[in-house]
């Protein structure tokens, strides 16, 4: 019998009121699922809704519509009080290790905060808990007495990872967790995340525009464009047989991928005024008249591969 997913997201929408009074459709009908122990990468250009999707899943932003089922429990309409037990099970690693740590707190204070907020342990046993977290992420126990400004960017991100691990979560969302780091440090953090996943049975959603990183860590990939998922596939299928023209354009920008370079015309449309029909059609090299009239439904191509495109046949 197949184990049910840890996370199921259906019809997720996050709409904001824009400056001119119009509605900004930051996330506009996202469907995702995540198995236990799996890494799902969400990729796309800046402004496509990746980070908003991640924050909405964690209820850091309130969804406008849709379903979010975590371990079989519907949480989309949970109050902040009702979310408290789920906060321990769902955590986030932020993009900027310099901005995500309080400069006025020692590392010990930063790592003790989750325990204090959730009433876990005592003041006497928390130093041991903090020391364990530091060891997990490859930092010396003496780091607990220091302040964030005394560490490098990679070390700060390790502290951020330690904080995310403090409550023994099942799901961690990494919002561009290595994009602010030097390339040599990126590899160290990626290897750390993979080791922690194996040791602790973690499930990851990795939000990234760095397809080179995604190609090394993801089990499955979801490609977003203007608030919608346009293609989902296992990693190998997506990288070696991309079906959506937007996915092919993204992959063509990755050195060594072997895909002929495709330069998209124009910019990503304004999410407050999305194009009619398929949102990608004004930039699409293979668009047909139907694309400007009707938004394509995502179709199952088999093998866990689905795509939303009128021109792609199964």
Image (cartoon, helix red, strand yellow):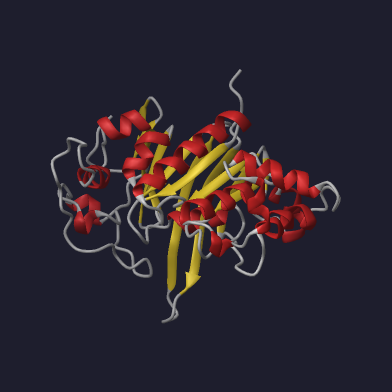
Name the foreground residue: 151 vs 312.
Answer: 151
Screen quadrant of the N terminus: top right
Residue 57 appears in the picture as rendered = no
- Outermost residue on the bottom side: it is 20
Identify which residue is drawn at 35% across, 59% down. 46
Pick whichever, 4 or 188, lies toward us.
188
Q: Which residue occupies the foreground of this view, 182 or 245?
A: 182
Residue name at image x 63 percent, y 32 percent: 200
Vertical position of residue 65 compared to residue 21: above or below:
above
Question: How far from the left and from the top, in percent, is residue 169?
Answer: 66, 42
Percent coordinates x, y for residue 111 in the rendering: 69, 54
The answer to whether 116 appears left or right of 204 in the picture is right
What is the quadrant of the C terminus in the image? top left
Question: In this view of the protein, can residue 309 be seen by the observer?
Answer: yes
Where residue 198 sits, quadrant-wise, is top right
- Residue at the spot x=51%, y=48% of the render? 174
Picture coordinates of residue 168 (x, y %)?
69, 41
Q: Where is residue 95 in the image (x, y as percent from the top left)?
A: 47, 57
Q: Would residue 261 be found to the left or right of residue 227 on screen? A: left
Q: Is residue 83 toward the left or the right of residue 203 in the image?
A: right
In the picture as drawn, the residue positioned furthest to the top comes out as 1
Residue ID at (38%, 40%): 214
Asked where in the image residue 135 lies, by quadrant, the reply is top right
In this rendering, the count of numbered labels is 0
Q: Which of 113 and 247 is in front in this view?
A: 113
Classify residue 14 as left or right of residue 87: left
């Amino acid at each position: 019998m197949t184990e049910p997913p840890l996370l199921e997201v259906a019809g997720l929408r996050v709409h904001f009121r824009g400056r001119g009074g119009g509605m900004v459709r930051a996330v506009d009908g996202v469907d995702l699922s995540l198995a236990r122990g799996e890494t799902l990468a969400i990729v796309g250009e800046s402004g496509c809704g990746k980070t908003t999707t991640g924050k909405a899943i964690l209820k850091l932003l309130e969804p406008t519509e849709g379903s979010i089922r975590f371990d079989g429990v519907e949480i989309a309409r949970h109050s902040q009080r009702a979310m408290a037990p789920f906060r321990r099970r769902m955590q986030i690693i932020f993009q900027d290790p310099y901005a995500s740590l309080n400069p006025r707190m020692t590392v010990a204070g930063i790592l003790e905060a989750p325990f204090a907020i959730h009433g876990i342990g005592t003041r006497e046993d928390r130093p041991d808990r903090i020391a364990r977290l530091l060891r997990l992420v490859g930092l010396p126990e003496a780091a607990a007495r220091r302040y964030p400004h005394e560490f490098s960017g990679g070390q700060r991100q390790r502290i951020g990872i330690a904080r995310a691990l403090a409550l023994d979560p099942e799901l961690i969302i990494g919002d561009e967790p290595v994009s602010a780091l030097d390339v040599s440090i990126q590899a160290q953090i990626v290897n750390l995340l993979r080791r922690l996943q194996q040791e602790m049975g973690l499930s990851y959603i990795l939000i990234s525009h760095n397809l080179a990183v995604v190609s090394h860590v993801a089990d499955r990939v979801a490609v977003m464009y203007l608030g919608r998922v346009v293609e989902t596939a296992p990693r190998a299928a997506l990288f070696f047989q991309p079906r959506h023209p937007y996915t092919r354009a993204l992959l063509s920008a990755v050195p060594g991928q072997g895909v002929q370079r495709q330069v998209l015309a124009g910019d990503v449309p304004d999410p407050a005024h999305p194009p009619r029909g398929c949102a990608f059609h004004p930039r699409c090299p293979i668009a047909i008249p139907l694309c400007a009239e009707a938004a394509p439904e995502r179709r199952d191509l088999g093998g866990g591969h689905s795509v939303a495109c009128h021109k792609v046949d199964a």
